[in-house]
Image (spheres, rainbow, N blue to C red):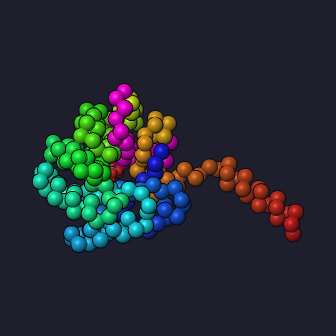
Amino acid sequence: MKFFIDTANLDQIKEAQELGILDGVTTNPSLMAKEGITGKENILKHYVDICNIVEGDVSAEVNAVDFEGMVKEGEELAALHEQIVVKLPMIKDGVKAAKYFADKGIKTNVTLVFSVGQALLAAKAGATYVSPFIGRLDDISADGLSLIEEIRQVYDNYGFDTEILAASVRHTMHIVDCAKIGADVMTGPLSAITGLLKHPLTDAGLAQFIADFEKGNK
Ligand code: E4P
């Protein structure tokens, strides 16, 4: 499973990259705003800065909601850096734009996906990634992980190449569960990723090893 970090924070991206486990980055307009990145020039520069930190795919979301606007914005984003993946909303024009970019060999990530039907459309349009938002489904008492499972089944039935990018991952067990189901990629916050490191028996075992070594090597 590929690990993407879901942030526009350069320090956190660097930290994940230095851990040696990072395969890419996802951003969205809310995450850019959270970092205070505003204005077209600054936003475009920030995407390039992210691409210069990581080696893998970097999703950059369009703000337009009409086909022509998405194509114009997406082409501009894709021209910034070879690692850029154009992120498109799961709406009618977003599906049309995904097909347009697929025909041009430009990678896309169809975002805001909340149903198997939407995921099926994204795959039919030739999206590189589909992003089902599991945390936001859990937030409304729906079952985000079941959605990943169902999309996995449908994509496997037909051998779709579109990768399932489990998004809106909120905590460490989401990552583990997505891996069990067979999501191709997960994107989550740094805290969920570093949470995978933690086990009290590892800490206790290491403390014992250090103490025993020190006793014998005074
Ligand atoms: C996906 O690419 C989105 O950026 C993200 O995962 C949304 O997560 P949230 O529901 O925690 O905002």
Q: Nearer the viewer, residue 145 or 166?
A: 166
Q: Residue at x 72, y 56 (%)?
A: 206
**Was residue 160 drawn as part of the magenta stretch in this picture?**
yes
Note whether 3 is above or below 153 in the view shown.
below
Left or right of 98 on screen, residue 156: right
Q: Nearer the viewer, residue 83 or 210?
A: 83
Left or right of 71 on screen, residue 43: right
Give the percent coordinates (x, y) of residue 118. 25, 36
Q: Residue at x 50, y 36 (%)?
A: 180
Q: Is residue 168 something one can see in this rendering?
A: yes
**Was residue 165 drawn as part of the magenta stretch in this picture?**
yes
Give the percent coordinates (x, y) of residue 70. 17, 54
Note whether 102 is above or below 73 in the view shown.
above
Quarter of the image containing the C terminus?
bottom right
Q: Is residue 139 something one can see in this rendering?
A: no
Left or right of 145 on screen, residue 95: left
Give the percent coordinates (x, y) of residue 149. 40, 32
Q: Residue furthest front?
A: 104
Q: Residue furthest top?
A: 157
Q: Residue at x 24, y 69 (%)?
A: 38
Q: How many marks?
A: 0
| Residue span colored magenta | 157-177
Quadrant in the rendering for residue 208: bottom right
Q: Residue at x 24, y 51 (%)?
A: 104
Give the percent coordinates (x, y) of residue 214. 82, 65
